[in-house]
Amino acid sequence: MSTLELCLAGIWILFYSYWIWAARRVARTKRGESPRSIAHMLHLAILLLALVITLTHVLRMGLLGDRFLPDSPVTTITGVLVLVASLGFAVYARRHLGRYWSGAAAIKEDHRLIRSGPYAFVRHPIYTGFVGGVLGTAIAVGEWRGLLACVLVFGSYLRRISQEENWLVQQFGAEYQQYRREVKKLIPFVL
């Protein structure tokens, strides 16, 4: 691994360390995807694969090893800033969600619909932060393999959002339908 890849990996390790630590105080699950379900395990495998693709040289071959951005300090710094800002946004969203957070798609006991803070900008800001983090990593690395990782993570979150929103509509009905009309799901003002 290069110094850059070690630095990027260090940022991700710090982020995931916080994520694991913060998971200790959450409400009980009323309905949710099992953390051992195939769908959840596949989602985690895709996230891990995306990080392996961008942070190691496993797929650094052919077109995937070619650069789509110039190899410059500006590119690297921009990527690191996008990574840190995106993961910071995910942490902010996680903290704002509080005890209703879950590692797997879930509805918690006494769940209420959160529409404030980062949830006023996108319906799934934690996912936005993760996708942005992978994008920042891809920018910092500057190779096509990073964009492949972005596509994998983006697709995985779109699948997960579809399932999660079905449960949220069942739980909150017209209130959630109104929220869907007013706030984009993943990219503010776009998607």
Image (cartoon, rainbow, N blue to C red):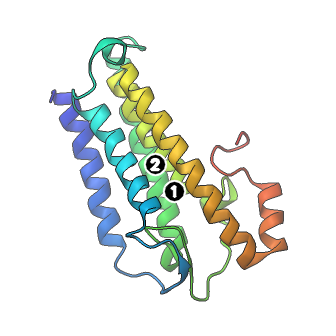
Mark 1 crowd level (few <14, some 14–19, many ≥20, 10 Å Cα): many
Report the front residue among 95 and 66. 66
- Left or right: residue 51 versus residue 175 is left
Query: Residue 167: horizontal and vertical position, in percent?
Result: 66, 71
Residue 115 seen in render: no
Residue 83 image-quadrant placement: top left
Secondary structure state at the residue bearing disc 1: helix
Q: Which mark is residue 126?
A: 1
Quadrant in the picture for the N terminus = top left
C-alpha span from label 2 to label 1: 6 Å
Query: Residue 49: horizontal and vertical position, in percent?
Result: 33, 42
Residue 42 image-quadrant placement: bottom left
The furthest residue to the front = 38
Q: Which mark is residue 130?
A: 2
Determine the residue positioned at 24% across, 51% down.
13
Q: Which amino acid does the dot numbered 1 rest on? A: Ile
Determine the residue positioned at 18% across, 36% down.
6
Mark 2 crowd level (few <14, some 14–19, many ≥20, 10 Å Cα): many
Residue 56 seen in render: yes
Quadrant in the picture for the C terminus = top right
Q: Indicate whether 137 appears above or below 87.
A: above
Q: Indicate whether 120 appears above or below 167.
A: above
Q: Pointer 2 and pointer 1: residues touching (CB < 8 Å)?
A: yes
Query: Residue 53: horizontal and vertical position, in percent?
Result: 31, 33
